[in-house]
Image (cartoon, rainbow, N blue to C red):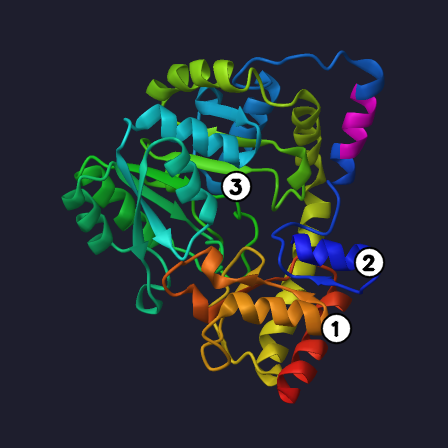
Amino acid sequence: MREAHRRETAGEDIIHMEVGQPATPAPRAARERVARAMSEENLGYTLSLGLPELRERIADYISTRYGVTVAADRVVVTAGSSAGFVLAFLAILEHGEGFGLPSPGYPCYRQILKALGFSPHLIETSEDGRWMPTTTDVEALAASGAAGLLLASPNNPTGTMAQAPRLKELADRCAQHGLWLISDEIYHGLEYDVEAETALAYSNAAIVVNSFSKYFSMTGWRVGWLVVPEALTRTIERLAQNLYIAPPTVSQVAALGAFDGIEELEEIKSRYARNRSLLLNELPAAGLTNILPADGAFYLYADIRDLTEDSEAFAQTMLREIGVAATPGIDFDSLRGHSYLRLSYAGAEHEMSEAVRRIGTWLRSR
């Protein structure tokens, strides 16, 4: 990202496929609500658990989207999903305890755990399991003494999902062994064939992490939410009071407005769907022939072992020679990621088309 920014600042035409963020601003309804609040309201501290009105709106959204009833008292507004993970880990884990993480997976999971004094237990997912943890993995976690499992569906970087039967199996097996289940649902809303299901449909004990960053197109606003068992609410409230005081008020106001922008957000999603189709159809002809199933989010995870065994050097060379920025797989899987590359298709459609053209010309010349 730093090198792509440096080159762009120097005048190079860089296509950004390295950053997992929408190219679109927050929905108009969110921006308009903030503009009114800026001129009319005192945007001081809110309660540590968030604006009561926003907690109610999130609970209503969950009920409408999934058909699952959640009391607003179980909703915690957070300073992005990152703060949500910090609060969840601190609320349920003792110092030194282990927690199961899928690999490949979002690197901040393991770094947050380590920074807080906990131990990541990496689960090597596979193509046979659609790059999702299995009940066998849960059994192994229980035998190892780990405290729980983190499931991300859709997953970053693979874009794959745990369909409803698998999700239920994992929730049931975690409950059977007394393991916590944290479900990262930040990419919910961004599915293209089958809608993602929430872990709340199968477990009242699950902790759900979500955010306004991805589907709601609000990465820089830094506002997210947790849904937690009622017994954890007071613990998390005390942690939030001491660590963050409260989530950013202006961002919570924007989040309230975002719920009135669903029609606009669905149009943005349709752009991702077009980008996804374009890349899946044209990248194989360009030379990236082995791409993992892309159920959701806005990523493609490409197996590039026939091109390189050093994804970091490959990504650096691609950026330097053709101005296409992508993320090497080693960010997500230190053991097998040398042979993978993550490509984000959250950008504009014309940029995706140009990226395919550049990659094809470049690979044919190598």
Query: In the rendering, at what x and y percent does residue 324 appear?
Result: 68, 67
**Label 2 neighbourhood size at 10 Å, few (<14), some (14-19), many (20+)?**
few
**For residue 11, above or below residue 69:** below
Q: How many angstroms separate mark 3 from mark 1 (CA)? A: 36 Å
Q: How many angstroms separate mark 1 from mark 2 (CA)? A: 20 Å
What residue is at 78 percent from the left and 13 percent from the top?
Answer: 41
Q: How many angstroms separate mark 3 from mark 2 (CA)? A: 45 Å
State which quadrant residue 232 falls in.
top left
- Please name the amino acid that badge 1 sits on: Glu
Location of mark 3 (residue): 65
Task: Assign the magenta stretch its main secondary structure.
Answer: helix
Q: Does the magenta-highlighted stretch encompass residue 119?
A: no
Query: In the rendering, at what x and y percent does residue 312 appear?
Result: 53, 65
Location of mark 2 (residue): 10
For marks 1 and 2 on the same chain, the one whose residue lies earlier in the sequence: 2
Q: Which secondary structure, mark 3?
A: helix
What residue is at 48 percent from the left and 71 percent from the top?
Answer: 310
Q: Is residue 180 left or right of residue 254?
A: left
**For residue 286, above or below residue 9:** below
Query: In the rendering, at what x and y percent does residue 296 appear?
Result: 52, 57
Image: magenta residue range: 31-37
State which quadrant residue 71 falls in.
top left
What residue is at 42 percent from the left and 20 percent from the top?
Answer: 236
